[in-house]
Structures are given as C-alpha cells and as structure tokens.
Image (cartoon, rainbow, N blue to C red):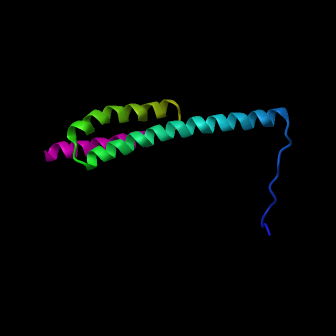
Amino acid sequence: MAQGNPVKHKKKTKSVLKNIRQTARRAAVNRMNRTRVRTAIRRMRAALGSADTAGATKLASETYSELDKAIRKRTLSENTANRYKSRVALALNALKAKK
C-alpha cells in the first residue's frame, strides 16, 4: 500500500508535452557532457596511477579542455570544475616532483 500523498499528474496539454520533450533532450545533452568529463578524468587518474608522466602531461590539457567545456555548457558549476582541475594539477606536479 502506497503511503504519503498521491502523485498528481498534469493534463497532457501541448505545453506539458513540449516541456517533457525539452526536459528529455536537456537531460540527454547533460548526460553526454557529464560522461565526457568523467571519462577524461578517469583517463587522467589512470595515467597518474601508472606513474606515466608523459602521458599524464598530454592528457592534462585534454582534461582541462573538457572541464572548461562543461563549465560553458553549464553541465558543471565553475567551482566544481576548478576543484577537479586543481586536484589534477596537484597530482601531476607531485608525479613530476618524484621523477
């Protein structure tokens, strides 16, 4: 038995249907952009974990670029993306200092 308030459904007017389409499209775009950022960060972390200085240096600019694109497309907030970039830079500098 369901508890709480029942879910209210809107009537399927033209504007509601259009809003549903817009939401689905925006969610797909945001998911694509977020996936692209996460993949770039994952590759960067793999390069840092394997102590591949040359590969990590090459991937750093690509990762920064993906993060900046996510900021422009408003997929990530600026503070979040800058925090990711800072952590990547710290890890890369630590790796370079080791060698």
Which quarter of the figure has residue 23? top right
Magenta segment main secondary structure: helix
The residue located at (22%, 47%) in the rendering is 51
Residue appearing at x 27%, y 46% in the figure: 48
Is 82 positioned to the left or the right of 8 in the image? left
> Which residue is depicted at the point 80% across and 61% down?
5
- Whether residue 31 is in magenta: the answer is no
Residue 11 on image: x %, y %: 86, 42
Tell whether 78 sits left or right of 20: left
Quadrant in the picture for the C terminus: top left
Q: Is 85 colored magenta in this rendering?
A: yes
The answer to which image quadrant residue 66 occupies is: top left
Can see residue 76? no
Q: Is residue 6 left or right of residue 69?
A: right
The single residue placed furthest to the bottom in the displayed view is 1
**How many numbered markers are drawn?**
0
| Residue 61 shows up from this direction | yes
Q: In front: 59, or 93?
A: 59
Depth order, front residue of 18/74: 18
Question: Where residue 94 sits: x, y (%)?
Answer: 21, 46
Please provide the residue range marked out in magenta.
79-99
Outermost left residue: 99
Task: Tell me the quadrant of the picture where the N terminus can be found.
Answer: bottom right
Give the image quarter of residue 19. Answer: top right
Residue 63 in the image, given as x and y percentages of width and height = 36, 36
Which of the two residues, 87 or 37, is positioned nearer the viewer here?
37
